[in-house]
Amino acid sequence: MISAFMQFEFLRNAFYTGILIGFLAPLLGVFVVVRRLSLIADALSHVTLAGIAASLLVEKRFGLMVGVSPIYFGMAFSVTGALFIEKLRGVYKHYQELAIPIILSSGIGLGVIFISLADGFNTDLFNFLFGSVSAVTSSDFWTVFIVTIGVLLTIILFYKEFFVLSFDEEHAKVSGVNARMFHLIFIIMVALVIAASMRIVGILLVSSLMTLPVAASMRLSRGFKQTIVLAIIFGEIAVIGGLISSFYFDLAPGGTIVILSVLILIVTILWNKVRGVKK
């Protein structure tokens, strides 16, 4: 595989991009899980699907956007969906959880309409749904790299605010934290990471990479920062192991990454049982 890695640029792009995604998704996933917003990843991934389908439709029917990566359309739709979720949370103040299924349903509906207008699935759309090693370009890598730098700097600069907001929103507000602004920043970061992850993991599986490594790390960790570190380690193991498996067995990388994440979770649960630890 090392010779193939040195020979083929797409393979290097896939691994470099995968390593960044394996870091990004669990990092944000810890905050998503702690805030009990796990379903938000599913909602935004389906909105991203609508964006990808719209991009392919525009390219096929009107000859526009040729040569432009559909990932940018997906990001625009994902961020728009995130803003609508935030708006709906304000509209339904006593039933804020309603915002997520509303946007999820809208994303599925729009995606199906765009796909039907584009005369069904094609290879590009299939790659976005389940991930693909060969589809990752250098442009995709640099896009993910920029998103990674932006998210990492934001988390480092405002870690204290995001931490307080995750555990006690009312206390954060009383302490002077602009909860609305930081929640908006957070949800936009989640939207960008989901859209950026779709080349490797696939739209339908990206939420798994944000939640499964976190679920596994929570079985072993003894604090919030340790949860982040372990979640990133598990995410990297799943992504790198999944990409290697998909290369040798000619499988969709999204599926192998998710199955490895599930296996890691099972091992951590069994490890706790063997040690007699109840978590």
Image: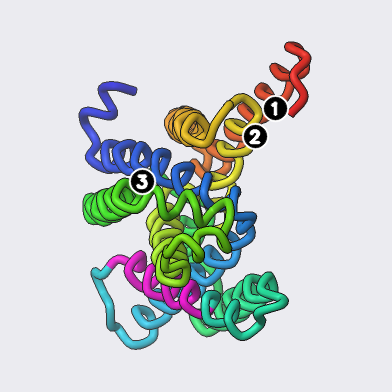
In terms of sequence position, does the residue under pointer 3 or pointer 1 come before the other?
Answer: 3
From the image, tell me which residue sits under label 2. Answer: 262
In terms of sequence position, does the residue under pointer 3 or pointer 2 come before the other?
Answer: 3
Going by the numbered disc 3, the residue's amino acid type is: Ser
At 54% from the left and 31% from the top, the residue drawn is 223
Question: The N terminus lies in which quarter of the figure?
Answer: top left
Tell me whether the residue at label 2 lies in contact with that at label 1, contact meaning CB atoms closer than 8 angstroms: yes
Who is closer to the viewer here, 157 or 125?
157
Please report the bounds of the magenta region as a residue range. 69-84
Give the percent coordinates (x, y) of residue 210: 53, 47
At 53% from the left and 81% from the top, the residue drawn is 87
From the image, tell me which residue sits under label 1. Answer: 266
Q: In the displayed structure, does residue 166 sit left or right of residue 160?
A: right
C-alpha separation, residue under disc 3 versus residue under disc 2:
24 Å
Q: Which corner quadrant of the image does residue 72 belong to?
A: bottom left
Question: The C terminus lies in which quarter of the figure?
Answer: top right
Going by the numbered disc 1, the residue's amino acid type is: Ile
The reply to whether residue 124 is in sight is: no
Which element carries disc 1, helix, strand or loop? helix
